[in-house]
Every structure is written in C-alpha cells, then in structure tokens.
Amino acid sequence: ESSTWHSFSAKNRVAHSTKKRLMIGTVDDEGDVTYWEVKWIKP
C-alpha cells in the first residue's frame, strides 16, 4: 500500500499529539523490510 504526503503528515500529527513516535515499515523488491521511526522536532 502506498502512502501520500497528506496521510503521512496526518499520522505524524496524531503520533505527536499522543506523545508517541511514528514507525513506518517499507518492503523492497526482495521482500526485506526497513523500518523508519519518525519524531517531531522543533527547528
């Protein structure tokens, strides 16, 4: 399932408002999974 920037941003806002970090997994062509942890930072 692909994701849009809009849905990614919405998920990140929910994670931030609930004081959680967003973890997203991607699967490559060989079936290997890479996990990405996203957190909100202030510049």
Image: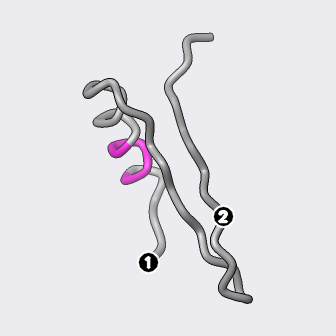
Q: Residue 5 at x, y = what percent?
A: 48, 52
Image height of 5 relative to 19, above or below: below
Q: Looking at the image, is mark 1 or mark 2 earlier in the sequence?
A: 1
Q: Quadrant of the N terminus?
A: bottom left
Identify residue for label 1.
1
Q: Which residue corresponds to mark 2?
A: 34
Q: Which of marks 1 and 2 is in front?
A: 2
Check disc 2: other Cα within 10 Å, few if <14, some if 14-19, many if 20+: few
Instruction: Report which quarter residue 20 is drawn in.
Output: top left
- In this picture, which residue range is highlighted in magenta? 7-11
Q: In this view, does 29 lie to the left or right of 2?
A: right
Direction right: furthest residue = 30
- Residue at x-position 61% and y-position 76%: 27
Q: Quadrant of residue 41?
A: top right
Is residue 38 covered in magenta? no
Percent across and percent down for residue 14 are 28, 36
**What main secondary structure does the magenta stretch of the protein show?**
helix
